[in-house]
Image: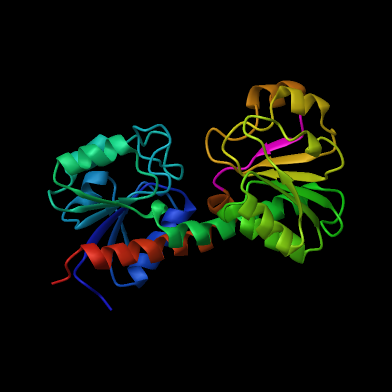
Amino acid sequence: MKNKTNIAVLGGDLRQYIAARELAEQGFSVKVFGIDRAEWDRSLTLCESFEGAISNADAVVLPLPATADGVLLSCPLAGIETKVRLSEVIEAMAARSLLVGGRIPETVVASAEAAGIRVRDYFGSEEFQIQNAYTTAEAAISIAMNSLTKNLFGARVAVTGFGRISKHLVRLLLSLGARVTVAARKSKDLAWAESLGCETLRLREGISPVELLHGFDVIYNTVPHWLFGRDFLEKADHSTFLIDLASVPGGVDICAAKELRANVLWATSLPGKYAPESAGRLIASCVGEILREEVSEG
């Protein structure tokens, strides 16, 4: 059903395009800028400028992440000449309008609120985090399946950390018959992992898990602190595939890994790369709920 809410969807990757399409199907009037597509959905209005997209908008939807450098709008699907400052977006927005996005920098939030603009970041919602974590975990399984020369069934796999992503990842690995070891700091996490049928290992702060040096086919890291430094990478089995899923700064010494040509993959933004349609639908679901809560339709 068509409603009276006008929204501008700016920048982003294929997830953002899917989200724009889904929001149009929810009944919102959608203008789009910064997404070049060979085929375009007729339910969307493509604008040549971000000012045109924002004109008369009740809400502006930024991508996930909203920016890669803290300054420019993230526009990976636009032409290389497309460079829009988030400060310019805020200046073009009307007071009391709504700014929605994923991982919006605090400086941008402060600037928007100072201009009388309401801000909502869907990335922080528990619903989004849980469902996005599942997509990340499934993508991480796909990476291993396409990289190993053996089945995951019977493979020895370690998972460091036991947060949202790890919980989904462990469940998927166990269902495939992998022999899973969970390394975590908290006793309750180790107890949960053990109850699921995993081997467990207690992590100690600031100390590399030497127990993982040998005998593992895959190590998934979800801990955003250095666990795998030069010393670990030099001594670890060269056949072990280390997949870093942690947020910045990650858990691997990047410089050492490159220098040693270690078997390491930094797997970031997996939902957008491996399952953009599912990830885009999730974004649209969260954004649509925010819009219905925050924007008057009367």
| Residue 199 visible to an observer of this rendering | yes
Residue 142 occupies which quadrant of the picture?
A: bottom right
Q: Is residue 209 left or right of residue 123?
A: right
Q: Is residue 94 above or below residue 205?
A: below
Q: Residue at x 76, y 30 (%)?
A: 262
Observer able to see residue 39: no
Q: Is residue 32 magenta?
A: no
**Percent x, y for residue 71?**
34, 32
Q: Quadrant of residue 283?
A: bottom left
Instruction: Tell me which secondary structure the magenta stretch mostly adopts.
Output: loop
Quadrant of the frame with the C terminus: bottom left
Nearer the observer, 3 or 199? 199
Total numbered labels placed on residues in the image: 0
* Residue 229 as seen in the image, left or right of residue 148: left
* Quadrant including the N terminus: bottom left
| Scheme of image coloration | rainbow
Q: Which residue is drawn at 34% across and 38% down?
A: 105
- The residue that appears at 74% across and 43% down in the rendered structure is 219
Residue 20 at what x, y percent from top left? 37, 60
Nearer to me, 64 or 247: 247
Question: Which residue is outermost to the bottom?
Answer: 1
Q: Residue furthest front?
A: 187
Q: Say whether residue 298 is left or right of residue 51.
A: left
Magenta residue span: 262-269
Up-down: is 298 above or below 181?
below
* Front position in the image: 129 or 223: 223
Q: Position of residue 64 (x, y in %)?
A: 42, 48
x and y percent of residue 252 in the render?
A: 65, 31
